[in-house]
Image (tube, rainbow, N blue to C red):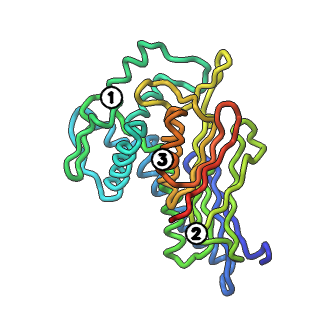
Amino acid sequence: MSMARVHRFEFRAMACACEITVGLQPGQDVHWAQEQAQTAVAEIKRIETKFSRYQPQSIVSQINQAAGQHPLELDPETHSLIDFADRMHAQSDGLFDITSGVYRQIWNFQKAQCPTPAQIEGIRPLVGWAQVQREGAQLFLPRAGMQIDLGGLGKEYAADRAALVLRQNGVQHALVNLGGDISSVGTKTDGQPWTAGIRHPRDAQHIMASLPLFGQALATSGDYERFFELAGQRYCHIIDPRTGWPVQHFRSVSVVAPSCLLAGAVGTTIMLKQTEATPEWLKQLNLPVLWMDTSGEVRMQTMATSP
C-alpha cells in the first residue's frame, strides 16, 4: 500500500501536539479524509471546552465553584465519566481519586521547591472521593475549596470519542494520537497493526518501545511530563492522594486496553501503587503493560491466553 493512501492531520488541543491518521480505501480521497478528521477534531475541542478546569464555564469549573454551597445536576455524559471515576476509585483502593488535583495549589513544578508539611496538612482535608455526595445525577462537594479534576481522564476520553466519530462516519482505518494518548480504528489498510511508539522517559528523542494496536487504545503515565529535581530526587505531577507527595515507584507505565479511558486510568493507578503491590494487580488486570522502574529496567506484561 503506497504512503499516499495514508493521510495525517496535525493540530493542537488540550495543551499538546495531536495527530489523526486516516488510511484510505479505494474511492476515498484526501478531501474525504480531511472532512472526517475535522469532524473528529471538533469532537475533541468540544470535550476540552466542556471538561477543562481552565475553562470558567466548563462543567468541572461549575462543580468546583459550587463546592460547599449546593449540588449540581449532571448531564448524562458527565454523569457517565464520574461513574467511571467512581469505579476506578473503588478498584484502585482509593488511589485513583479525582479530588486530589487540589494538591497542585501547593506543588508548583515550575520551581524546585517542596511544600511544607503544614501546607500538605492544610490541603489534605479537601482530598477524598469518599466525601463527595451523590444522589441520582446530582453531585455535591461538601467542603468549600474541594475540587474535582478530570485531567487524568479528559484527553483519554477525547481520544476514544474521536475514534468513535471516525468509525460512525465510515472510517475503517485510523489512529488518533493526543499527545501520546492513542485510540485506533481497525488496522492499517494492509491489515498490519498500527504501531504506537512510547517515548523514553529520560530521553525525549528516543523511543523506548513500540506496541502494536489492533483497534485498541494505548495510554502512558510517566514522571517526565511535569516535574522538578531537588537534591537528586525527582518530584513529578502524579500525587498520592493519601500523602500529598509525588509518586516515586516508576518512571513510565504504558497500558493497552479496549479504551484509552481505561488504559489511562490503569496506568495512573499503577504509577500510584507501591512497587511490591503491583505485580499481583497486573496479573488480575490481564492487560498488556510496559513499564520502566526507577532503576531504568524495562519490563512487559502480555495478556494471558484464555484457557
The crowd level at tag 3 (other Cα within 10 Å; few <14, some 14-19, many 20+) is many
Distance (Cα) linking label 1 and label 2: 41 Å
Left or right side of 118 for 233: right
Which-is-in-front pick, marks 3 and 2? 3
- From the viewer's perspective, is 118 left or right of 228? left
List the residue tagged with mark 2: 185
237 with respect to 300 (left or right):
left
Mark toward the start of the polypeptide (1 vs 2): 1
Do labels 1 and 3 touch, CB within 8 Å? no
Which numbered marker is on residue 115? none
Which label's residue is closer to the chain start, 3 or 2? Answer: 2
Q: Residue furthest right?
A: 2
Amino acid found under the numbered disc labelled 2: Val
267 over 43 or under it: above or below: above
Residue drawn where x is 70% and y is 70% of the image: 7
Rendered residue at 64%/71% (across/down): 187
Q: Distance between the residues labelled 1 and 3?
A: 24 Å
For mark 3, what is the residue?
A: 265
Asked if one can make out residue 244 in the rendered structure from this viewpoint, the answer is yes
- Circle number at residue 145: 1
At which x and y percent is residue 289? 59, 50
Which residue is at the front of the view, 251 or 146? 251
Name the spot of residue 174 as percent of width and height, x first: 62, 69
